[in-house]
Amino acid sequence: MTTKRDFHDLAGFAAALPTTGVVMAIDVGTKTLGLALSDRTRLLASGLETLWRKKLTKDLESLLPLAAKCEVVAYVIGHPINMDGTKGPRAQASAAFARSLAAVVDHPILLWDERLSTVAAERALLEADASRAKRAEKIDMVAAVIILQGILERLRELRKNPIGA
């Protein structure tokens, strides 16, 4: 039985989360998947690794055992909305990735507006004096960390001030 899932429903995502557990963020690039993990208490995001993309089925075959090993209970996928609010090809690719992931896992999945996360990641890598090659290798993972830290902070705010309270 397939049900339509709303990957943009922050309140629904928060309600579906177990009390504790690791959340994985995925920055879906054209060539790589940048991965970040939260700690079990969801206070801190840290980079995990960068997977080189092949095709979607192979990407999931690489991702799922890694997520199982890390005991992931939910996924946040960066959704690169254009600055004017429109959804271009990259946003559509992230949404397609979310749908494909949802077909094979039964964990909460959230598409999170990641405008400017790559810019922030690039800035952080420049400040760390990373070489051009190192920046290219790590940019999507650092963007995933920024995305995940943003959602962790938003989830903490939501717990303090629930919607409709």
Image: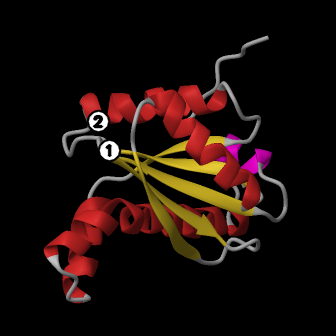
Report the disc number at residue 90: 2
Q: Give percent across and percent down for residue 43.
A: 65, 77
Quadrant of the image occupied by residue 1: top right
Which region of the structure is painted magenta? 10-16
Amino acid, disc 1: Pro
**Mark 1: which secondary structure?**
loop
User: Which residue sits furthest bottom?
Assistant: 128
Front in this rendered view, residue 80 or 24: 24
Rendered location of residue 60, percent (x, y): 57, 37
The residue at 73%/13% (across/down) is: 2
Q: Is residue 99 above or below residue 145?
A: above
* 90, above or below 160, in the image: above
Give the residue at x 17% y 80%: 131
Question: Is 49 displayed left or right of 91 in the figure?
Answer: right
Q: Position of residue 145 (x, y in %)?
A: 46, 68
Identified at 38% across, 69% down, the residue is: 142
Q: Is residue 18 left or right of residue 50?
A: right
Label 2 close to label 1 by CB (< 8 Å)? yes
Q: Main secondary structure of the magenta part?
A: helix
Judge whether residue 104 is colored magenta.
no
For the C terminus, the quadrant is bottom right
Q: Which residue is mark 1?
A: 80
* Residue 35, image x, y percentages: 50, 59
